[in-house]
Image (spheres, grey):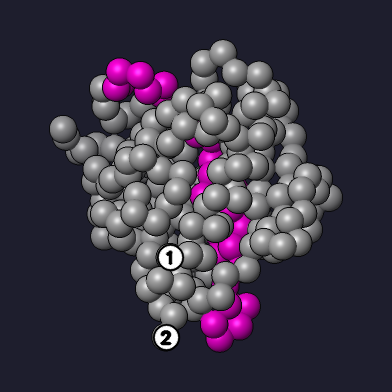
Amino acid sequence: MSFEGLDLSQATKDWEYLKEVGENPNSAEWKEEKRDKKENIVIYSREHEDEAKKLLEFRGDAEIDAKIENIVEIFNDPEQRVCWDNTMEEFSHLWKNDDGFIVNYSRTKPFLGGLIASRDFIAILKFKPTEKGHWISAGSSTKQVPVDEKKGVTRGWCFPAGWYMEPIGENKTKIYYLIRTDLKGALPLWAVNKGSFAAIAMFFTSIRDEVKKRYSK
């Protein structure tokens, strides 16, 4: 598979988009959807007036008891992703360069007791720090990379999504996790929304568990 001539401009736009989200978390557009006091996770949503306006954009906010460098190290380890991320069945970097651009393949586990079957995604993303040392991983689905669909797996479409991470203490990092996904298939919107809530919660639980496993003394 050749990766020559890839247009990486959308990934840069996505990175700037996540930067705007992370630097303006209190924007009035965001509506609080769920606050889990036990797990210390807050989920927000907002609407978009585009071709997929029925699909809400979701943002999960949580604090992780770890240095930002440790979390970056975890995210930069694709071979171990399925070992700790309970939302993932398969995950790999198909290509990457020294400028932080990555072609990513991911396949999710079924959600909601199998109501949402496994989906896979091919995305181009950019994983780089800002001038302030805040890390952003941002990208969206692409049709530039021809990966065959797998039997029994629906190919989904991911709008600009990713993570914005900033240190808020010596051993604490704030993460804003953004997703807006067209899961395709015949799914009611309530199932898509509930699946998004579940994915956000599972992601934060997974990264916290991995942090404890790797870095707790």
Which is nearer the eye, 150 or 36?
Answer: 36
Tell me whether the residue at label 1 lies in contact with that at label 2, contact meaning CB atoms closer than 8 angstroms.
no
Tell me if residue 173 comes above or below residue 107 in the rendering. Answer: below
Q: Residue furthest top?
A: 186
Can residue 18 be seen in this snapshot? no
Classify residue 206 as left or right of residue 97.
right
List x then y, in percent, for residue 180.
Answer: 59, 37
Q: For the residue carrying disc 1, how many other residues have a C-alpha within 10 Å: few (<14), some (14-19), or many (20+)?
A: some
**Magenta residue check for 146:** no
List x then y, in percent, for residue 124.
Answer: 38, 41
- Residue that numbered label 1 is attached to: 210
Q: Amino acid at mark 1?
A: Glu
Looking at the rendering, the stretch of residues picked out in magenta corresponds to 149-178
**Magenta residue check for 156:** yes
Tell me if residue 131 comes above or below residue 94 in the rendering. Answer: below
In the image, what residue occupies the spot 41% across and 21% down?
154
- Residue that numbered label 2 is attached to: 217
In the image, what residue occupies the spot 49% across and 57% down?
206
In the image, what residue occupies the spot 42% across and 37% down?
108
- Predominant secondary structure, magenta span: strand
